[in-house]
């Protein structure tokens, strides 16, 4: 079944057993909604200097959006901001590829479990689900850093 | 056709032959699966007869309407105005001049909201007045009233819903008061299928002198519609859900009102005479049809109305009722499935929303799609209903005159597969 | 093809082969006369390619757009949004999100007028501000501003016309002042064919900080259109005049403005999230597209744009220029014929209005029609122009990419017949 | 040529040589416009009791509308109101017939020259032109009589 290329075992696994779920202390909190389907996420980021020490979240939505948050947590927590941003860009590129990028080894090294989302990129209506938590992270980070900048200013 | 023990004798069902009229139903998706189209509340498929009417219009008669003395202009005008006659007859309008062509139901609803905002007394909606709607409206019958309320200061009120998906009219005297200028509600809910009781609402509205606008977008395609029997002042619906083309909607309004109320869009066709200093407006319906109208689309809608009428709207309603009854019965047998809305086929249309355990509707829809089954998932432009029932979204299967019991069976099999997939 | 001594070498003319793409041009009227269609400023005929795109859409991909996870919904969405990409490229829009689909140019123009009426500062049109238009506007670019002016108290001003059918810009500083919020004018006059000088007007508008809306309804079908080069803030046009279906129009607007300005119609598709208490709106273009959009019509317009682009808009412009030059020359030879508008082919489009002695245009049109020649007669939704030149109406012949010198010859012969008939 | 069934010699003759044209003294004056084509007529009626003693008019427009006014004048002036109304009704019926009424002798007796308009009824865009002066007459009459009634009241 073609669908399986979208619903990879890995995605279903993250969906059923989300990593790092729950809201914990953070520097900034955002709430993002995917208006087309009602997927929601509340997400907090915690930075220690340039190091992303936690992404905590609560949400409801489809397997793709929920697995997305779980994978985001697993992949980015512990990373330096610059590296996290690079990973996010590669993931975005993959998701906007309309199924045209076949992840190579280099990409797999960057994205780890997140390469499982390659199949989702063929389904335009679902790309937004996959990106929901990533966009929330980006937004929360901007807020956290904006605050930090304001504090130091 | 599937064996339907006891439940369906088949006598109310329309024949399978109808499917042959709809080219899209032969569409094959996902490597060889014939489409099972259960997204009719979103839009209907189009019969060959409607496509032929469109092609014939463009190939033989295309011209701009009105004001032309050449033969094409006269033919196009006759076809366009002939479509108005057909629609008027279809809804039993007292006069053809009460039928306004718009681009969709949303424009029809906005048109009324805007007219009332600009109207003189006694129609004028302003800070001292109220607007009444319901919690089960389509966004297209919510947002125009929110905008009107923001712009005029009028208070927006609404009827809530009962747990079984019906309007809660228990506080009707608080929702519709002496201050109410307009009551706007849907005849049939697009998300739950609920058929609403018009009589009580219309009676109360008339008591306080409020105008009544009925959103018949989910009714016109599926049951006989008689604007006089409804007792409303305005009725709105949309062409693409009733076998017609996209790009065409209808607003019916009572003649006196259309005479008294101000125009909405200004431009060609809607004027009587224009100078740089001032203009006067043509009588309705033209007063409300600025610019080149959706000519081909009106002609197509006329052909759709002919098509539906030839089959018979009560036959269509009976067919859908039988399918709905069967679908509800079979859905009730699916473990963990909860119907959002009326759980019997009484006073309901053929749109059935449900949630399946804690599997998100997006996932339900996606796995059904892979089997060739097209349902809609989400809030169906009726997010307040989802909020009311504490769910993020639903899966909705909606049927039409070409739907068959076999479609229901395919849906049930598909849902079984969904449960296994996420089990 | 007719012999065109000296005047037309034929090198700028598009081939006769183009006519084969347009089924309607084979239409025979009045006992055996092949139609000579010279009513292109009212609406154009549709090439086979556009009709095929419509049929393919309805037969293979029809579904409601957005919000769907099934394959048809994804295909329909891709086709609809793909049409937006095509239109954006056609007008050289900086971003596809600046292209809004409406039902016609009239709605596009009304949309801007309504946005500005409801806008906050600095865009808000109110009693202390002014609106500037011209005396050669189509009613669809007059009445919306009259309505806005009545509703807000803003003052409506306009540019007058010179005796030879051009804008009189001599008092530009009085017409466009520091109080002016919006200047709206047509790029090409639908009645006289005049091509207006945009630069001077845009420059003055920018000087005083007024927004500029250009009505390109008679330009988009006939010449390359580059919204960035125009320097306007909004550009409106209509699908049915440019080989597209009826029921579709376009409004292009600058991104920042579309972000800042309030929505017009409320409903499904244009929202981000809705509760009974309040709603937030989707980003442009969706913010301005309430309800089910004209999906098939957008797809058809996309096909029209492909068709025109494949031929080349500058080739089309050159063809029409050659035809117009020839038509003006031949018309000038008809006794008692007076052209209303520019009498040379410079800076003018292919719509030519005239009066013939004291024979009323209605009679001219009727007698031409009997010979199979379709022209338009009347005030062409530009009554102020008729008032300006002291005439009740004109006869208008208007050409397009499929028009040929033989069509001009047929018109000239037809006019000879008219003169004899009423002589 | 089919068209000749619309542009009867009689119509062209009335168009070229209008009867009773010009504005004279009257009991009421109306101005009617056909917005679809700009045809205009200013028309006055004069009654002596029940007798229509004059219809005077000025106007501009196509041959059909102008000939219509001329024929109206010729046909109705001198008639009693009741009879004039009957003639108007018969003419209206003919014009709304979409070319389906072939005037018989009885009709010809009532309408006289006005039967020449039978062909016009096939052209919906032109029916309004033909009716312009008749509608103006009806309106002017209502005003004149309304005034008269008010005077006697
Ligand atoms: C210059 C101009 N503006 C606006 C319009 C209005 O276009 P539409 O009737 O498609 O709304 C037209 C055509 O009718 C036109 O020629
Ligand atoms: C109940 C109801 N009202 C209004 C609408 C809006 O119709 P349209 O999108 O054609 O404007 C719909 C359908 O989308 C509907 O189901």
Image (cartoon, coloured by chain):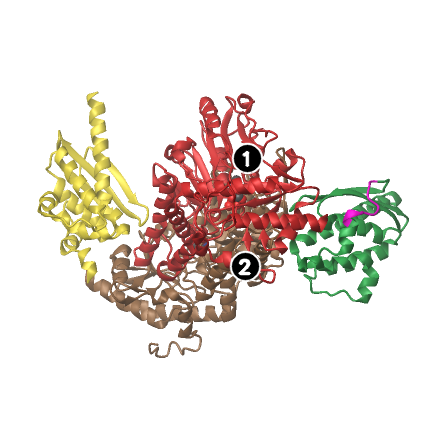
Chain colours: A yellow, B brown, C red, D green
Q: Which residues are magenta?
A: D15-23
Q: Residues within 10 Å of mark 2 (few under 14, many from 20)?
A: few
Q: Is residue D136 left or right of residue C100?
A: right
Location of residue B192 by image quarter? bottom left
Q: Is residue B259 left or right of residue B406?
A: right
Q: Is residue A121 above or below residue D26?
A: below
Q: Is residue B289 above or below residue B231?
A: above
> Which quadrant of the rendered structure holds the C terminus of chain B?
bottom left
Label 2: element kind: helix
Q: Main secondary structure of the magenta part?
A: loop
What's the CA distance linking mark 2 and mark 1?
Answer: 67 Å
Residue C144: % across, % down: 54, 38
Numbered label attached to residue B199: 2
Q: Is residue B61 left or right of residue C356?
A: left
In the rendered structure, are the residues bearing label 2 and label 1 in contact, judged by CB atoms less than 8 Å apart?
no
> Does the stretch in magenta take in C91?
no
> Does the stretch in magenta take in D18?
yes
Say which residue label 1 marks: C344
Residue at image point 15% right, 43% down? A73
| In this view, the mark in front (2 or 1) | 1
Say whether residue B137 is visible.
no
Q: Is residue C164 left or right of residue B145?
A: right
Q: Is residue B409 above or below residue C155?
A: below
> Which quadrant of the rendered structure holds the N terminus of chain B?
bottom left
Q: Nearer the viewer, residue C68 or C204?
A: C204
Q: Chain of mark 2?
A: B
Q: Nearer the viewer, residue A77 or C29?
A: C29
Residue B316: % across, % down: 46, 69
Q: Chain of mark 1?
A: C
Q: Nearer the viewer, residue C116 or B201?
A: C116
Residue C236: % across, % down: 46, 39
Residue C30: % across, % down: 61, 60
């Amino acid at each position: 079944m073609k669908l399986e290329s979208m619903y990879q075992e890995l995605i279903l696994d993250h969906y059923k057993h989300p990593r790092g779920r729950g809201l914990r202390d953070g520097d900034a909190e955002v709430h993002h909604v995917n208006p087309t389907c009602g997927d929601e996420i509340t997400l907090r980021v915690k930075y220690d200097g340039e190091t992303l020490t936690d992404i905590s979240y609560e949400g409801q939505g489809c397997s793709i959006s929920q697995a997305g948050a779980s994978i985001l947590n697993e992949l980015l927590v512990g990373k330096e901001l610059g590296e996290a941003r690079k990973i996010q860009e590669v993931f975005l590129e993959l998701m906007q590829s309309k199924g045209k990028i076949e992840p190579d080894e280099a990409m797999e090294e960057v994205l780890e479990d997140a390469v499982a989302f390659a199949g989702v990129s063929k389904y335009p209506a679902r790309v937004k689900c996959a990106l929901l938590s990533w966009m929330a992270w980006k937004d929360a980070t901007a807020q956290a850093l904006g605050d930090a900048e304001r504090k130091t200013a | 056709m599937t064996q339907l023990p006891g439940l369906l004798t088949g006598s109310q069902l329309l024949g399978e032959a109808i499917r042959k009229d709809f080219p899209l139903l032969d569409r094959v998706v996902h490597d060889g699966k014939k489409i099972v189209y259960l997204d009719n509340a979103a839009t209907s498929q189009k019969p060959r007869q409607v496509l032929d009417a469109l092609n014939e219009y463009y190939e033989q008669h295309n011209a701009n309407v009105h004001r032309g003395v050449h033969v094409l202009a006269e033919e196009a005008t006759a076809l366009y105005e002939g479509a108005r006659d057909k629609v008027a007859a279809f809804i039993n309008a007292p006069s053809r001049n009460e039928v306004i062509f718009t681009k969709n139901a949303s424009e029809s609803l906005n048109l009324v909201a805007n007219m009332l905002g600009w109207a003189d007394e006694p129609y004028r909606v302003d800070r001292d007045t109220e607007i009444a709607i319901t919690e089960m409206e389509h966004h297209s019958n919510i947002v125009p009233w929110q905008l009107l309320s923001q712009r005029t200061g009028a208070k927006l009120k609404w009827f809530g819903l009962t747990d079984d998906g019906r309007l809660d009219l228990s506080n009707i005297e608080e929702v519709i008061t002496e201050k109410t200028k307009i009551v706007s509600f849907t005849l049939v809910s697009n998300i739950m299928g609920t058929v609403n009781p018009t009589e009580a609402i219309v009676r109360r509205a008339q008591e306080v002198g409020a105008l009544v606008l009925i959103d018949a977008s989910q009714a016109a395609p599926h049951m006989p519609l008689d604007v006089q029997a409804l007792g409303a002042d305005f009725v709105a619906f949309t062409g693409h859900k009733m076998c017609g083309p996209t790009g065409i909607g209808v607003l019916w309004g009572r003649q006196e009102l259309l005479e008294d109320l101000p125009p909405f869009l200004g431009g060609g066709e809607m004027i009587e005479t224009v100078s740089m200093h001032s203009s006067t407006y043509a009588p309705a319906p033209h007063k409300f049809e600025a610019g080149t109208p959706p000519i081909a689309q009106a002609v197509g809608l006329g052909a759709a109305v002919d098509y539906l009428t030839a089959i018979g709207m009560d036959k269509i309603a009976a067919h859908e009722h039988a399918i709905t009854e069967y679908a509800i019965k079979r859905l009730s047998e699916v473990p963990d499935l909860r119907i959002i809305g009326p759980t019997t086929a009484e006073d309901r249309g053929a749109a059935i929303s449900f949630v399946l355990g804690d599997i998100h509707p997006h996932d339900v829809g996606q796995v059904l799609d892979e089997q060739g089954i097209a349902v809609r998932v989400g809030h169906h432009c009726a997010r307040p209903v989802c909020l009311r029932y504490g769910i993020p979204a639903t899966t909705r299967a909606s049927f039409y005159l070409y739907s068959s019991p076999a479609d229901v069976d395919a849906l049930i099999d598909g849902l079984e597969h969904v449960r296994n997939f996420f089990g």
